[in-house]
Amino acid sequence: MKQIFIIFGFLFSGFIYGQETKTTAFLSEITKYDISDLWTLKKFRTEFESDTSWIERLEPFGYIGDNYQRFYIHFTSVIQNPNNILEYFVYGKTRVKTNICSFQGLIKINDSKTYNDNEIPSVKQGFVLGVYEFYEDKDQKGTGILKGKFRTDFYFDKNGQIKYNSLMFIADGFKNNQFEGTWTGYNSNDSKKCNWGDYRIPDSKNLDCGTGEFGVSDKYVSNGWRGYMISNVVSLDKMDVDRAKKAENEKWWIDKE
């Protein structure tokens, strides 16, 4: 049965992201919702699970620079702007290697659409598109501005509420919350490509060699990805796996006492 779901999910994924899919404008309607939890949720359900079963959402995967150095980002808070409901104030932290920086900024929704035909007829689905600009704290080391565009996918539950679109979570290539842009240093004006996303990273085909799930090319494993690969892909040593999983699950964005 799971194999059937995976095949179905693959076809569905092509449908959702294909260029031929017809959509209906939803920008005016999206203003009726506060969708801040699409970027901050900790757990989600999929359509194949019971009402009491949850999936814990992984922290986003990200990279910075042409060498695909691992980039971490965590949104600690997202708040809808009461004066402009297409904007959301964002607060959080970034990390590169051991350097952790606080940031604040803005997400702005520029467009939203729903699909005219859904692979799951009973479930209405759609997405939002927009831009973001995050400012790291200038008083901290190695800081700058994160700027670019994003896409977030959603669906409507049986109560008409917008939810994080995890319907095809078991399908190969599942992704959501795709952020694509640059990081530019305050002092050097050095601009680097910096992308991140849930379960996959946009514009990462040289880095991501995974098929069913995110996997790192051998060429870039040493650039911050070794722990992920040990805990998820390659190691048979239980102690190595346990250490790697502990590091991967570390809540690095919480201040140490």
Image (cartoon, grey):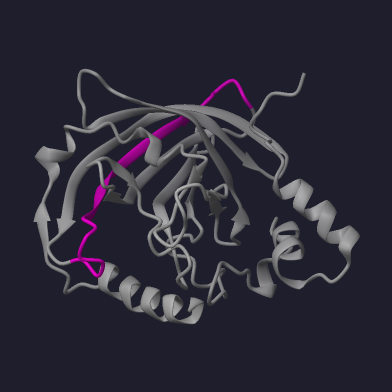
Quick one: 5 or 204, which is closer to the camera?
5
Residue found 63% across the figure and 55% down from its top: 69
Percent of width and height locating residue 164: 37, 48
Q: Is residue 143 above or below residue 205?
A: above
The residue depicted at 75 percent of the width and 57 percent of the height is 227
**Quadrant location of residue 94?**
top right
Is 114 one of the magenta-colored residues?
A: no
Q: Is residue 128 magenta?
A: yes
Relative to 114, 164 lies left or right: right
Residue 63 percent coordinates (x, y) = 56, 54
Rendered view: 82 above or below 19: above
Say above or below: 187 vs 191.
above
Q: Residue at x 24, y 40 (%)?
A: 109
Residue 233: quadrant of the picture: bottom right
In the visual, does 237 lie left or right of 38?
right
Q: Is residue 62 left or right of residue 116?
A: right
Could you say where residue 41 lies in the image, as x and y percent from the top left? 46, 39
For the record, the magenta segment spans 118-140
Instruction: Count the labels in the image.
Output: 0
Q: Residue at x 27, y 67 (%)?
A: 16
Quarter of the image where the C terminus is located = top right
Pinpoint residue 83: horizontal percent, then vertical percent. Answer: 20, 18
**Above or below 76: residue 190:** below
